Amino acid sequence: MSLMDKNNQPLRRFIDRIKPTFAKGGRLPWLQSTFEGFETFAYTPNEVTHNGAHMRDAVDMKRSMITVVIALMPALLFGMWNVGHQYALATGDSLSWIAEWWFGFIRMLPLIAVSYVVGLAIEFSFAQIRGHAVYEGYLVTGLIIPMIVPISTPLWQLALAVAFAVVVGKEVFGGTGMNFLNPALVARAFLFFSYPTHMSGDTVWVSAKHFGDAVTGATPLGEIMASNAHSGQELLQGLSCSALDMFVGVIPGSVGETSVIAILLGAALLLLAGLASWRIMLGVVLGGGLMGLLFNAIGANAYMQLPFYYHYLMGGFMFGAVFMATDPVTAAQTNRGKWIYGLLIGAFAVMLRVLNPAYPEGMMLAILLMNCFAPLIDHCVVAGNIKRRRNRGRAR
Amino acid sequence: MQDITKIRKGLDIPLEGCARKIVSDARSIGLYAVKPTDYVGLAPRPVVAEGDTVLAGSPLFVDKNNACAKFVSPVSGTVKAVVRGEKRALLAVVVASDGRTECADSAPDDLALLSREQVRQRMVDSGCWTLLRRRPFGIVPLESDNPKAIFVSCFDSAPLAPDYDFVMMGREEDFGTGVEVLAKLTDGPVHLGMRPGQALSQLDYGPQVEIHFFEGPHPAGNVGTQIAAVDPIDKGDVVWTISPQEVAIVGHLFRSGQYRPEKLVALTGPCAASPRYYRIFSGAELDRLCGEQMASRKGCRLISGNVLSGTTLPLDSPTLAPFLGAHDDLVTLIPEGDYYEFMGWLMPGLSKFSFHRTFLSGWLRHLPGVERFLPKMRYDFDTNLHGEPRPLVMTGEFEQVFPFDIYPLQLLKAAIIGDVDLMENLGIYEVEPEDFALCEYIDPSKTDIQCIVRTALENIRKEGI
């Protein structure tokens, strides 16, 4: 198709015709960022290079973000089916797997919708006020937030959490690329600290027939916290699910985090596409494993005796390792720093789980903690480079 | 024993339109210009007026801040115009050639008898001093400079770069003499960077000359990469660089007494009808060649230099014709990319070239052995930005195309905020914007990295004066 044809399609002509309405001097200038957001969604812009390299790589932030969203799909789709499946198991209703998936889909849809509508409305407003285009950071965060909260989270709580995360967690610092805390985890932490009864326990994870209702169904982490077992063996026998169940993900839990295998599929896509750091992922897994082994060696109580690899299978460990710890903006930015960052996240996550009596899941807190330390880690790594350069100069 | 360094970080961009090894003569071009905008940090003052007669090697303008910097005419003839732009900034001094290329009479020099001072003076008077570039800052060397080494990169790895084995054929003696001249100018070594097996490596050089071989993708041919691999620049160090054809021009000056800035320039690119080499004088006007090579001038961009760090030349400007850049021996013609693409960011993108693997083409490129089964991948290359500028988000990517012991993202961020101390600590003195060209190419956030680095370097240089 020649250049003239590419610029001449009906949709393109329509957009060009209504464009002046949203520009300065038009009738709706306050919607300019919104209009541009939708325009660049439909058409990659016709901007050419003006300074520096005359050609640029075909990839842009939209492409990167959409690839991450695709990587989230296995976990999301499985999680939707799992919501229905857990409901069927808990209530004794027997459903086909399509019906189970549809059940979960219907219950996830409001959460996803609220997350995107509230988050994007705030982002569009900030873009308009600041006079720049809408940045794509929220495409991924907006999908992750519903995947890490319990399915029975009230929508108004979710909306508040999203607003808090986008405004205080991101925009206050300057928007996409400027924040130091992972916005999805800020939303989760907001919910956890403000509405703790809705976020933990065993009556939030499994959906009931009516929207927002839940029936009893504890996650493995919850069961471990509540258990009185005296040894690791007893603990394992007391769990209502097997290791295989946990690996495949047919257990109660947040929509995104239960299925390790679906998360690994997403991880494979992210690694193949070069979008997530393998150093961070491997670091988290190794750090968690080493801390788990350490606890196995100490063996002071039943939880410590639990074989270390169970930590990978339970709770949000793998989801955090693959999708949250690897957020490039809030993680360490140097390669060496990424190792240290990942190892410490894994170690802290397991440590918080085993030693902290207040909350079964340590991953969220571990990542938030290391988000605060990532700049320090980078500073120390870069300081090594600076010192090497200085010594090289002095050696002459 | 050969000293071969394998450069592992970088990227070769498979642009089409490489120059075929045929040479057309373009020495009959009538207009030439020397442009202060081809150099860094000049305060130019013209020393000729319209209508003056000049010889090849006569000064056209000088730098007010640098007594050694005399910018001379490449050909003999009459000064046609002294072109000024906004705020009376000097844009170019244009000379109409009289076709005879006369230069001031001068006897050839016997290098063995000359002292360093005499060699320097000869370089300055002839105008060859301005062929040299100085790191840090990329400016014309100062009178007070005492370089610790001089680097010549004898090959170019940029997309569509000329083949220096072909270009330097027949100029070996001039090149050898030029290297001898360089050796006189410094106490330290003259480092020549070459590909293994390059023809120039077979010549005999003096004891001060060291040959280093480099393998690997672009930017192996960038002189900055070679400096970093051989002898990185520290604070306070000064290093001079010069390109191989310019070395031959210097050598020709000392061998024959004549200043003759004749070069082989490759005209390349997807928009070029018949890419080839042209024998041409420095600073030539490119209108006629463009007319020959471009079917339609609309929708094409004319670049003096390579696509990564070259300068756009105006094709139909009323003020200034397109003149070849002073240091350039490559001209690239690529299509403009000002088109919209429906949901372009979602498409599989087989014809889109990307360093990253989010496009199908990127995956196929990285799979081993695929080339045998698939037809040669052809990509659409044009000037489309493929997105819009965004804040810096991705990390760990610049490091893959930046073969220095420097943290590129951290240095870039220090340059953006203007933290001079941090920039110094992170190695700003080692780099020139062209070293960041590949980072700018692959950046998904479309940051104007080379611009930022040049601004930072200029600010540091001006603060230091």
Image (cartoon, coloured by chain):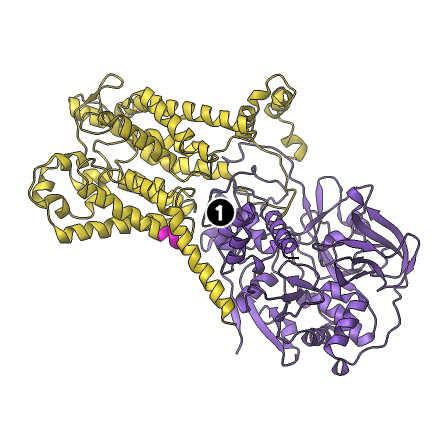
Question: Residue A337 lies in magenta, yes or no?
Answer: yes
- Residue at 40% x, 31% y is A168
- Residue at 63% x, 57% y is B464
Residue A14 location (% of width, % of height): 61, 21
Residue B403 location (% of width, % of height): 51, 59
- What main secondary structure does the magenta stretch of the protein show? helix
Residue pushed farthest bottom? B113
Q: What amino acid type is highlighted by mark number 1?
A: His
Judge from the rendering whether residue B181 lies leftward or rightward of residue B27; answer left or right: left
Inspect this view and state whether residue B377 appears.
no
Q: Quadrant of residue B385?
A: top right
In this view, B79 is above or below A8 = below
Q: Chain of mark 1?
A: B
Residue B231 location (% of width, % of height): 55, 69
For this rendering, which residue is in front, A85 or A134? Answer: A134
Judge from the rendering whether residue A356 lies leftward or rightward of residue B221; answer left or right: left
In this view, B45 is above or below A5 = below
* Number of numbered discs: 1
Q: Colour of chain A?
A: yellow
Question: Residue A21 lies in magenta, yes or no?
Answer: no
Judge from the rendering whether residue A278 lies leftward or rightward of residue A237; answer left or right: right
Q: Quadrant of residue B60?
A: bottom right
- The residue that mark 1 highlights is B356
Crowding around mark 1 (Cα neighbors within 10 Å: few <14, some 14 to 19, many 20+) is: many
Residue B232 location (% of width, % of height): 54, 66
Query: Of helix, strand and loop, which one carries label 1?
Result: loop
Q: Quadrant of residue A201?
A: top left
For this rendering, which residue is in front, A390 or A319? Answer: A390
Q: Which residues are magenta?
A: A335-339
* Chain identity for the colour purple used in the image: B
Q: Quadrant of the N terminus of chain A?
A: top right
